[in-house]
Amino acid sequence: MPDAVQVRALLLDDSNALLFSAASAWELAIKTSMGRLTFATPLETYLPQKLASEGLEPLAITIDHATRTESLPWHHRDPFDRLLVAQAQLESLEIITSDKVLRRYDVGVVW
């Protein structure tokens, strides 16, 4: 399991494709609308600019991603995290997170 320095190296390695799920954008939007997060500019402006400047590609949510969550064990109650797991499984991706609960799923977790 890599530490924060190793994760940073993975993020900076141009040979790795970095994806940002629409599920994470949705979660940010909800938390922003609830006043739990703030950004200097509206999220709909900030996030696309940030993704582009950091070299992250958006990952859309598909029907297959959404329906895969039905078959996942209930290790995690957070619907956004469950969707991230489903996306990672179906797209053969690894998730970068410090959330140890996600390790209980059949998915690669980095960190």
Image (cartoon, rainbow, N blue to C red):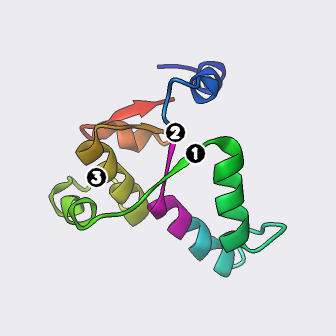
Q: Are marks 1 and 2 in contact (CB under 8 Å)?
A: yes
Numbered badge on residue 18? 2
- Mark carried by residue 35: none
Query: Sequence-wise, which precedes: disc 3 or disc 2?
Result: 2
Q: Which amino acid does the dot numbered 3 rest on?
A: Ala
How many numbered marks appear? 3
Query: On the rendered structure, is 78 left or right of 71?
Result: right
N-terminal label among 1 and 2: 2
- Between disc 3 and disc 2, the foreground one is 2
Q: Inspect this view and state whether residue 54 appears.
A: yes
Q: Which one is nearer the viewer's eye here, 26 or 2?
A: 26
- The residue at which mark 1 appears reads as 56
Helix, strand or loop at label 3? It is helix
The residue lying furthest to the bottom in this view is: 33
Which residue is pictured at 60% across the width and 30% down the height? Answer: 11
Relative horizontal placement of residue 81, taking residue 47 as reference (left or right)? left
- Toward the right, the furthest residue is 40
Residue 13: give x, y in percent of width and height: 59, 23
What's the magenta region?
Answer: 18-26
Residue at image coords 73%, 64%: 46
Q: Which residue type does callout 2 highlight?
A: Leu
Which residue is the site of mark 3? 86
What's under tag 1, amino acid-wise? Leu
Dot 3: few (<14), some (14–19), or many (≥20) neighbours within 10 Å?
Answer: many
Local SS, label 1: loop
Real-space CA distance between mark 3 and mark 2, rounded to the nearest whole angstrom: 17 Å
Using residue 81 as the reference point, say whether residue 25 is left or right of it.
right
